[in-house]
Amino acid sequence: MLIVFDGLDGVGKTTLAKEIAKKFEAKYFRCFLPNDEMKLKTLINNKENSINIHKNSIKYIEKRCCKILSFLKSNKNVVLDRYIYSSIAYYYAITKMEKNIVKIIDYNDFNLLKPNASFIILLDAKNIKYRSKNKLLDNTDKLSIYNKFFIKNVTNCFNFFQETEDIFFIKNNNNLNKTISKILDILNNVKDTKPNYWIGEESINKILFKLK
């Protein structure tokens, strides 16, 4: 089974992903570019390179998927910390915020695995700020925590994904056991199917239409 945790920075994805990985005796992967914050900072500050940086992010995830596939074929569970949803949402949100032209790429050209269940973790702004108070913030962190326009656009993207994907929104109420219990209740009703590939055309069309 392939399980994904995604959402804005500082909502508690990593903690939840690691706990669920333990419960399922699953392989845990962080599924985003190394030094990802620096990459996103460059994306924000350099309009010319934003599409190339985004493509590199998706290519990195595609490489991860090759490794993940071998585990799934061995009937092992895999839990991912971040996936394509936030990569795509951040790209479109930042591009629109900079009033730049959205350059579309065909995600169906990439071999991206379709998760059995994806969880978008939600946390209110006050708690995100509290969780981040001792963290050295870069430009991307500041966007995720303080920029209402950016947060709204990213959240809209997640909402559009929910309309076309097997995505569950989970509110992190800072009670770890209760949040994990909610996730486990959902996973108990999710069917483990053979590995398949993600087709994102319908989701992306919704995002582009709404963010024009």
Image: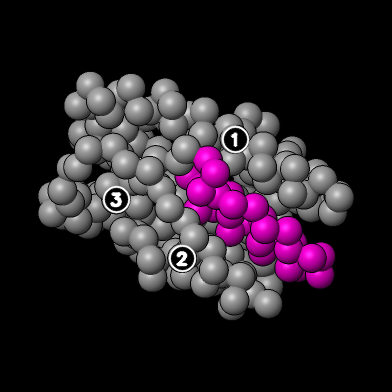
The one nearer the camera, 152 or 105, is 105
The one nearer the camera, 87 or 8, is 87
Residue linked to disc 2: 202
Image: 30 above or below 203:
above
Residue 125 falls left or right of residue 174: right
Residue type for callout 2: Glu
Quarter of the view holding residue 14:
top left
Percent x, y of residue 7: 49, 55
Q: Which residues are magenta?
A: 81-110
The answer, for residue 138, to whether it is visible in the render is no
| Element at label 1 | helix
Q: How many angstroms separate mark 2 from mark 3 (CA)?
A: 18 Å
Residue 150 falls left or right of residue 184: right
Q: Which mark is residue 117?
A: 3
- Is tag 2's residue or tag 3's residue first in the polypeptide sequence? 3
| Element at label 2 | helix
Disc 1 residue crowd, few under 14, some 14–19, many 20+, Cα 10 Å: some
Residue 91 falls left or right of residue 85: right
Image: 127 above or below 211:
above
Disc 2 residue crowd, few under 14, some 14–19, many 20+, Cα 10 Å: few
Residue linked to disc 1: 59
Residue type for callout 3: Ala
Percent x, y of residue 108: 51, 48
